[in-house]
Amino acid sequence: MSPRITVPAVVTVREAAHRVLARQVRELRRQERPVAGAGTPDAIHDMRVATRRLRAAQAVFRGVVALPKPARRRRLRWLARRLGRVRDLDVRLSLLTEHHLPHVAGQEAARLARLVADLQQERRREHRRLQRGFRRPRYRRMRIAFAAWVRKPAFAEGAGEEPAARFMAEAADRAAQRVSGHEAMHEHRPTAEALHDLRIAVKWLRYTLDFHAEACGLAYDAERALARDLQDCLGEMRDHDLLFAMLAADGAGAWTQLSRRVAEGRQKLWRRFLELRRRWHARTRPAQTVAPLEAPRFVNLEVTPVQLRLVADGR
């Protein structure tokens, strides 16, 4: 008797949506106690990422999932803002204390120490505001709504019954096209705001690839690694730009040593970005075109598991 072969069931879009959103909800809940308690920088960062990923998942599966009103995407915005205020202060404090304060001398070092103390005090205030937010009825309603949906998911009528592989591949492809077509991927000297907007597009691509891997079992290792490196580099550039703007607000010459160090760090990140941008273009292939009518031929129109206009390095 021949052995029985088990054919894996096809994952539908509904199943993928439930799998992805349930995981993000669990991660959000897992970080709640550490953030509401000591609120360490790592805990703040992890919960902020969980919030962003949950909002991204809601957007990817928009039109498929039917979430209760307290759990909808815009209801997460206030939590993302509160977490973002604390996280931005953590990043700024880390840059100043770990990378710059030990290398600044004289009166500027004393002024920098006072600035760090002021930022630490502001950080404590923002964390207390975040803690109060966890006790608000709005947050409790949101928690209950997400938990109820995870236990008994609801979907838009007639939506999401098709296989998830095509749906997710198309979502990832659209995200990759947004990155490829972004002005900051082509201009000689993109503005700081254009680079920040590109970071958001790259982050969206990375999350979509993660969701595809989670729902359909596709790893996208090379693509996710490149997106992660781009996102990290652009994020550090954004941190330097915001710090430089804060220093410039005190007037020219107010922070001579510190401004020079921040500018040097930003220049290193700019060179890193150019290299990552070159790698992206090197891995990008033109979109497939349809053959002209005068030369008809059979064309494979099926979406393959990996179709991001990115090809592996042949070396």
Image (cartoon, rainbow, N blue to C red):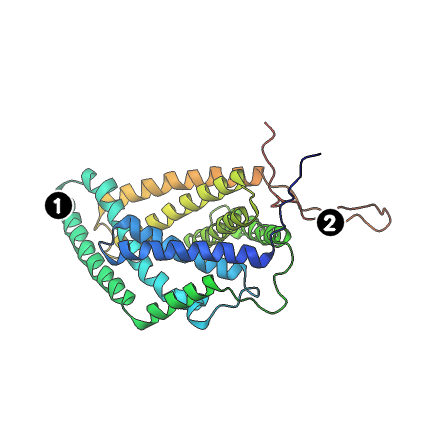
Residue neighbourhood size for the residue with mark 1, other residues' Cα within 10 Å, grouped as few (<14), some (14–19), many (≥20)? few
- In the rendered structure, the answer to whether residue 110 lies left or right of residue 282 reads left
Q: Amino acid at mark 2?
A: Leu
> Residue 69's image quarter?
bottom left
State the quadrant of the N terminus. Answer: top right
Residue beneath disc 2? 301
Q: Residue at x 27, y 63 (%)?
A: 130
> Is the residue marked by circle 2 packed among few (<14), some (14-19), or many (20+) residues within 10 Å?
few
Asked if the residue at tag 1 contacts the one at tag 2, i.e. Cβ–Cβ closer than 8 Å, the answer is no
Q: Amino acid at mark 1?
A: Gln
Vertical comparison of 166 with 140: above or below: above
**Vertical arrangement, residue 139 with respect to residue 37, above or below:** below
Place of residue 128 in the rendered image (x, y in percent of width and height, measured from the top left): 22, 62
Foreground residue among 109 and 204: 204
110 vs 100, left or right, is left
Question: Residue 117, position in %: x, y?
Answer: 16, 52
Local SS, label 1: helix
Comparing 211 with 201, the one in front is 211
Q: Which residue is mark 1?
A: 107
Horizontal arrangement in the rendering, residue 68 relative to residue 129 (left or right): right
Reading the chain from its start, which is encountered first: label 2 or label 1?
A: 1
Q: CA distance from mark 2 to mark 1?
A: 67 Å
Relative height, residue 12 to residue 217 (above, below): below
SS category of the residue bearing label 2: loop
- Residue sitting at x 20%, y 61%: 125
Estimate the x, y position of residue 189 in percent, counting from the top left: 47, 47
Residue depicted at x 16% and y 46%: 108
